[in-house]
Image: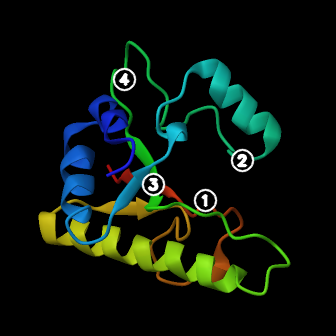
Amino acid sequence: MKNEQLLNQCEGQLRELFHRVDTIVQVEILPSTIRTLEQQKAFVAAGTSKTMDSKHLISPEHPFSRAVDAGPYPHRWPQEGSKDAWKDWARLYYFAGVVVAVGREMGIDVRYGGDWNGNFELKDENFFDGVHFERRG
């Protein structure tokens, strides 16, 4: 697992989930998993996040991240205009399916940033965060 040390700042069930996922497909934990208030403000200003109430924020009230940004290793963002961009999108969705399925197997209800409402209909989303995973509840 790449950047495994970042999981040390995540809540326990998320740590367990991504360690299990890593036994199926190699995981890359992204640096955006852990955020300060200043970093979150920058993400919102850039449009890569929509809320200041992010589950990635670490604070005295929430000493552990309640969300993980992760993808298959090596992580690649799909490049618009590339003839192979669809392959990178497919990799992200395939990875998300593994994370959600392993979560279910472990009794962890996972919310995926590509299907926020969990209805398995991806076209009804108005904000896509293809590397975001959080525990519901």
Residue type marked 1: Asp
Residue type marked 2: Thr
Q: Alpha carbon of mark 4 to alpha carbon of mark 2: how far? A: 22 Å
- Which sits in the foreground, 131 or 81? 81
- As helix, strand or loop, the secondary structure at mark 3 comes to strand
**Badge 2: residue crowd in 10 Å (few <14, some 14–19, many ≥20):** few
- The first of marks 3 and 4 along the sequence is 4
Q: Is residue 100 left or right of residue 42?
A: left
Q: Which mark is residue 14?
A: none
- As helix, strand or loop, the secondary structure at mark 2 comes to loop
Question: What x and y, as percent, mark residue 124?
Answer: 65, 78
- As helix, strand or loop, the secondary structure at mark 4 comes to loop
- The first of marks 2 and 1 along the sequence is 2
Question: What x and y, as percent, mark residue 94?
Answer: 44, 80
Residue type marked 3: Ala
Instruction: Answer whether labels 2 and 1 touch (C-beta < 8 Å).
Output: yes
- The first of marks 4 and 1 along the sequence is 4
Residue under numbered circle 1: 129
Residue under numbered circle 4: 62
Instruction: Answer whether labels 3 and 4 touch (C-beta < 8 Å).
Output: no
Question: What x and y, as percent, mark residue 24?
Answer: 24, 72
